[in-house]
Image: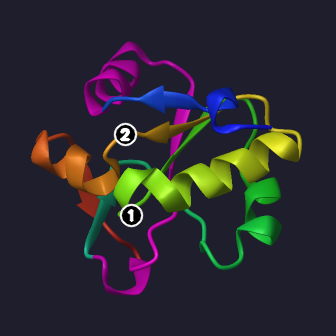
């Protein structure tokens, strides 16, 4: 599996998918989650240090769109490639990650602890 097996989602495309009711599920894999105050609206959380045990538990039926706060989508791409290699055929990453989503002004919600 290579990086080209993972779809690349621009923030505008993910926002449009939400509005259209497409089957997409954002997944937050930010390393700094413990200090995060907000997340992409509707995002699930996967600990980037324990993703091999948590990704298999994510719901099926939707394309999993991973996002992080690392340059070049480094963390989200790692998790997405692992998910693909382990049976998830529909995975993607949010280009620009958390920072791009917030900069575009798309919906966020408080992190629940």
Picture disc at residue 33: none
**Residue 106 position within the rendered picture, expressed as x and y whole percent measured from the top left:** 19, 40
- Residue 113 visible: no
The boundaries of the magenta stretch are 11-36
| Front residue (pair 10, 62) | 10
Question: Residue at point 37% right, 39% down?
Answer: 95
Q: Which residue is mark 2?
A: 95
Q: Secondary structure at mark 1?
A: loop
**Residue 80 position within the rendered picture, expressed as x and y whole percent measured from the top left:** 65, 47
**Residue 84 position within the rendered picture, expressed as x and y whole percent measured from the top left:** 78, 40
Q: Is residue 2 magenta?
A: no
The alpha-carbon separation of the residues under discs 2 and 1 comes to 11 Å
Image quadrant occupied by the C terminus? bottom left
Q: Is residue 22 magenta?
A: yes
Q: Which residue is mark 1?
A: 70
The crowding category of the residue bearing disc 1, from other C-alpha atoms within 10 Å (few below 14, some 14 to 19, many at least 20), is some
* Colour convention: rainbow
Which comes sooner in the sequence, label 2 or label 1? 1
Residue 18 versus residue 66 in the image, above or below: above
Answer whether labels 2 and 1 touch (C-beta < 8 Å).
no
């Amino acid at each position: 599996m290579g990086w080209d097996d993972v779809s690349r989602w621009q923030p505008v495309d993910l926002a449009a998918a939400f509005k259209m009711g497409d089957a997409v599920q954002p997944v937050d894999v930010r390393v700094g989650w413990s200090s995060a105050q907000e997340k992409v609206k509707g995002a699930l959380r996967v600990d980037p240090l324990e993703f091999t045990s948590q990704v298999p538990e994510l719901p099926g039926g939707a394309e999993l769109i991973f996002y992080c706060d690392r340059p070049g989508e480094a963390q989200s791409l790692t998790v997405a490639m692992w998910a693909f290699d382990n049976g998830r055929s529909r995975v993607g990453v949010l280009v620009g990650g958390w920072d791009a989503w917030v900069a575009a002004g798309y919906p966020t919600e408080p992190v629940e602890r």
